[in-house]
Structure formats: structure tokens, C-alpha cells
């Protein structure tokens, strides 16, 4: 009979309920029989020893907060009797005398991709329409529909646009963020060709935007200012026809797995996130990094409380200092706007069994596996080093997935215990933390990590996930967000709009 609870770490003072449990039910932990004193929802914590007021609650082998009252063995442990330990800024000290290394495997693994003229590799051969300003979102939308109708059956994977509200009346860093993200998307290797639409009177006007696009290739990026033409549909369609002809020269070919870049993201967590989906994605990350590939993780506020785990994995002291700056700069951002630094988890996370930010963060960072951190990348910048990278960005699902795509991710692995239909500009594979969610939302979910508490081993499931990712990368299958056309973007806002 399968146990109704999960002990995550041998030193934990709590276990996690794998199903809803009723007062009076019993289970065994470390040869001790425990009787529930309260009802406990699925994915929530149960005390397996008496915990005194002020004493730390231990999960994953680390404190996730402290008891606000005496907690008896068999009691539900959650917001009613637990409070975070986090407060204020912390100081950090580099202590990794022996830099972490990872043993690279002699991998012959390949995937099928599109090799671009500059040597970059894409996993889709799409035409993207990017608008410099939100005023013409609908123009871009209608032009994409027209393009998909006109060029159906051509050697492209579709025409897509990504609406956003920015580009007009923005100043300072706010405008800079918008330009950086749009410029990185314009350079993304999944887009064989890009049509940039401008209105003509916006702050992010085309001539200004051109200056921030790295290595501007006018053969694959075309520009159209819609105020300057009589019929933007006719003009846009003509430019798309040229881009489609350009895109047709690219055909899939076998490329080394080391060329693959995968973003790592979690959203809508529950009590299973840190014991199924996130550790599974971490195992995937280590497997890809061992074969020379690249993984990218963001969501800086969801590192708070677990940041020292990442700092201890810095490949050298320079990277350690970059992680410290990454963490402290984001805390300063909260303080600058007079917001509590540790305001997390969200109501949905709490409903799923997550009590404190430490608990969410300790589960969240497991997506990065155990590989060394090779680099820290600013928001809107590309990843340049193979291996496990951190990227500056918030926890917000839309903004962080867009940041991962802008950093160069071909695919994003998105773990969730609550479920979401959202997908970014790149294939966004949703990984359910539990089997109930996977079955309930089959049109959203791509992979079921709930198998890990149902008798399947991590070794088995991580290779299944790896193969599923390779199939999506090679175009053999689609992510669900592609099948149902859930493709969106969002840009981090930090500044003044006139």
C-alpha cells in the first residue's frame, strides 16, 4: 500500500500529505505511528514531532520558518501556526575554496534544428511580428492572421505576433527594458524572419530601436512604420513574403545537444512542487548540462531564503559576487517601492500548501539541480556561457518566461501545481506536480511529474522528460501552448510613463 505521506529529508520535522487526510487517520514515519489530530489538505505539512513556539520548522533539511505556537505531533502545519524567519538584508561571504566543476559526458546526443547563417540554432522556423508600441497590437494581430492564411503550406512553422502595452511615453530604464526585450526577441533563433512594426510617433520609434538590435541583419529583419504607408496590410504582407522566401532556405538538420538552451520556471506552486516537478526539472538540468547544454533560471524573489544554496554553487568568486548583487539589487527594488521584501507566497500558493517564502524558495531552486552556476545575466541580455545560468527577472509568470526567451531559451520547462494555459514566445512545456492536475488539464499539461510519488523512480522519469524535450526541440511534437496557440509576452516595468 502506498504511503499517504512523504518525508522529504531525513532531518525534517514535518511530512507532506500526498492526499487529503482526516483527523484520526494514522501513518508511520521512521517506525513511529502517528495519529492525525486535525484534518490535513493534500500537499500540506504535518508535524512528526512536538515543535515549541519559536522553534524552526524543518523541510528539505532547512528551516522554512518558525512555530508561532506549540505544535503537537500529528497537527496540520501551515499559516495558522508558522511564520517566516526572513527579515531585512543579509551579508554573505564566499567560502567555496574549491570551485565546483561538472564532469561533461562524451555525448553523441543530437536534436534536429535549424542552423542560421550566424551559426545560431533554432528549433522553429517561424516568422515573428514585433511591434515597437502597444498602439498597433491589433494591426500586428490582423497581419499575423493574414500571413498565416496567405503562407499556409510554405516551409515555415507559422506567423506569430506578441502584443504588449509599452513603447509609448516611456522614459529612462522603463524604455530601456522595453527596447532590450524586443531587441532580444528580434534576434531569437526560433524566428527565421522578423517584421518590426512601428507606428511613427512613439518613444520607441524604429530608428531608435534599430540601434539596440545586436548585429542587425536586414535580410532577416524588416521594418515598417505604419503611419508612413497608405495600406499597412498590403505593405506588411509584401515584406512578410520576402521573409518567408528567406526562411525557406533553412531545413532541419542534426545538431549537437550542446546547442540546446532550456529555461526553467515554476508558477502556481503547491505542496508537491518541491518533491516532484522541481526536483525532476533539476535532474533534467543536470543531465543537459553534463552533455554540454545550457539551462537558464530566473525568478529572483523566489530565491530569497534559499540564495545561499546557489551562492555555494558559484563556479568562482566572481560569479558568487554577481549572485550577491543579483539578490541584493532585487531586495533594494522592493524597498525602493516601499514593499515588503518577503511578500510571498501568493494566495494560490498558500491554498496549495506553501506557507512561507523560504519553503517556496527551497522548492523553487531545486529546478537548477546541482550544477555549478557559471554566469549571472542581466535582464534583457543573452546567455553566453554553456552550463547553468541565472538571469535577472521577477517571479511573475509572463515577465519571467519572456525574460528566459530573451536570454536565448529555445524551450521553457514550466512546473505548476495549480495549472495555467500560459505560454511564452517559445515552446512552454507545462509540467504538472501531481497526477490529478495532469489528468484534469490535459490540454494545458505536457508532462506528469506526479509519477514520482506513485512508484516511478527519478532515474526513469528524468530520461522520459529528457526525451520529451528533445522531441519538442526536433519538431516531432508540439508543446500544448503551441497546439492551442497560447503564445504571449510581457515586459518588466520599472520607471516613469508620461
Image: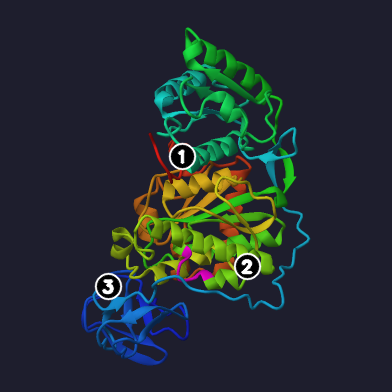
Query: Can residue 281 be seen from the camera position used here?
Result: no
Q: In the drawing, what numbered circle is on residue 79?
A: 3
Residue placed under numbered mark 1 in the picture? 489
- Residue shown at the point (61%, 69%) measured from the top left: 370
Q: Residues within 10 Å of mark 2 (few under 14, many from 20)?
A: many
Secondary structure of residue under mark 1: loop
Secondary structure of residue under mark 2: helix
The N terminus appears in which quarter of the rendering? bottom left
Secondary structure of residue under mark 3: loop
Q: Outermost residue toward the top?
A: 230
Callout count: 3
Residue placed under numbered mark 2 in the picture? 320
Mark 1 or mark 2, earlier in chain = 2
Quarter-wise, where is residue 64 in the image?
Answer: bottom left
Q: Residues within 10 Å of mark 1 (few under 14, many from 20)?
A: many
Instruction: Describe residue 45's horizontal placement relative to residue 333 as left or right.
Output: left
Mark 1 or mark 3, earlier in chain = 3
Q: Nearer the viewer, residue 329 or 419?
A: 329
Identify the magenta region.
303-307
Q: CA distance from mark 1 to mark 2?
A: 30 Å
Decide whether residue 306 is among the magenta residues. Answer: yes
Q: Up-down: is 406 above or below 65?
A: above
x%, y% of residue 81? 26, 78
Amino acid at each position: 500500500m502506498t504511503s499517504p505521506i512523504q518525508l522529504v529529508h531525513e532531518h525534517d520535522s514535518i511530512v507532506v500529505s500526498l492526499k487529503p487526510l482526516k483527523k484520526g487517520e494514522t501513518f508511520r514515519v521512521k517506525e513511529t505511528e502517528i495519529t492525525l489530530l486535525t484534518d490535513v489538505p493534500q500537499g500540506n505539512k504535518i508535524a512528526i514531532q512536538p515543535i515549541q513556539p519559536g522553534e524552526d520548522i524543518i523541510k528539505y533539511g532547512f528551516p522554512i520558518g518558525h512555530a508561532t505556537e506549540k505544535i503537537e505531533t500529528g497537527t496540520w502545519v501551515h499559516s495558522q501556526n508558522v511564520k517566516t524567519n526572513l527579515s531585512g538584508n543579509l551579508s554573505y561571504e564566499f567560502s567555496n575554496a574549491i570551485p565546483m566543476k561538472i564532469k561533461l559526458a562524451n555525448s553523441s546526443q543530437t536534436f534536429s534544428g535549424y542552423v542560421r547563417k550566424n551559426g545560431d540554432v533554432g528549433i522553429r522556423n517561424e516568422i515573428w511580428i514585433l511591434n515597437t508600441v502597444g498602439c498597433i497590437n491589433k494591426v500586428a494581430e490582423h497581419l499575423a492572421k493574414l500571413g498565416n492564411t496567405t503562407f499556409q503550406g510554405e516551409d515555415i512553422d507559422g506567423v506569430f505576433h506578441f502584443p504588449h502595452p509599452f513603447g509609448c511615453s516611456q522614459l529612462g530604464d522603463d524604455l530601456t527594458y522595453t527596447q532590450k526585450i524586443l531587441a532580444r526577441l528580434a534576434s531569437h533563433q526560433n524566428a527565421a524572419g522578423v517584421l518590426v512594426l512601428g507606428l511613427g510617433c512613439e518613444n520607441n520609434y524604429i530608428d531608435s530601436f534599430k540601434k539596440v538590435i545586436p548585429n542587425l541583419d536586414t535580410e532577416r529583419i524588416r521594418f515598417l512604420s505604419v503611419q508612413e504607408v497608405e495600406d499597412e496590410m498590403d505593405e506588411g504582407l509584401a515584406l512578410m513574403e520576402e521573409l518567408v522566401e528567406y526562411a525557406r532556405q533553412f531545413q532541419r538538420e542534426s545538431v549537437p545537444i550542446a546547442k540546446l538552451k532550456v529555461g526553467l520556471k515554476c508558477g502556481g506552486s503547491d505542496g508537491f512542487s518541491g518533491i516532484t516537478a522541481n526536483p525532476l526539472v533539476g535532474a533534467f538540468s543536470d543531465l543537459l548540462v553534463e552533455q554540454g547544454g545550457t539551462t537558464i533560471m530566473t525568478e529572483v524573489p523566489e530565491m530569497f531564503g534559499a540564495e545561499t544554496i546557489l551562492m555555494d554553487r558559484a563556479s568562482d568568486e566572481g560569479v558568487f559576487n554577481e549572485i550577491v548583487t543579483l539578490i541584493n539589487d532585487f531586495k533594494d527594488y522592493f524597498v525602493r517601492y516601499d514593499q515588503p521584501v518577503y511578500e510571498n507566497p501568493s494566495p494560490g500558493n498558500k491554498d496549495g500548501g506553501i506557507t512561507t517564502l523560504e519553503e517556496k524558495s527551497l522548492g523553487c531552486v531545486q529546478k537548477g539541480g546541482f550544477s555549478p552556476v557559471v554566469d549571472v545575466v542581466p535582464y534583457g541580455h543573452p546567455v553566453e556561457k554553456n552550463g547553468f545560468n541565472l538571469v535577472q527577472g521577477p517571479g511573475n509568470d509572463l515577465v519571467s518566461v519572456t525574460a528566459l526567451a530573451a536570454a536565448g531559451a529555445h524551450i521553457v520547462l514550466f512546473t505548476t501545481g495549480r495549472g495555467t494555459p500560459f505560454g511564452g514566445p517559445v515552446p512552454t512545456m507545462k509540467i504538472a506536480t501531481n497526477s490529478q492536475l495532469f489528468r484534469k488539464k490535459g490540454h494545458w499539461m505536457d508532462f506528469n511529474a506526479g509519477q514520482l510519488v506513485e512508484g516511478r523512480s527519478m532515474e526513469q522519469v528524468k530520461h522520459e522528460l529528457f526525451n520529451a524535450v528533445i522531441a519538442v526541440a526536433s519538431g516531432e511534437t508540439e508543446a500544448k501552448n503551441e497546439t492551442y496557440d497560447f503564445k504571449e509576452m510581457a515586459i518588466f516595468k520599472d520607471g516613469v510613463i508620461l
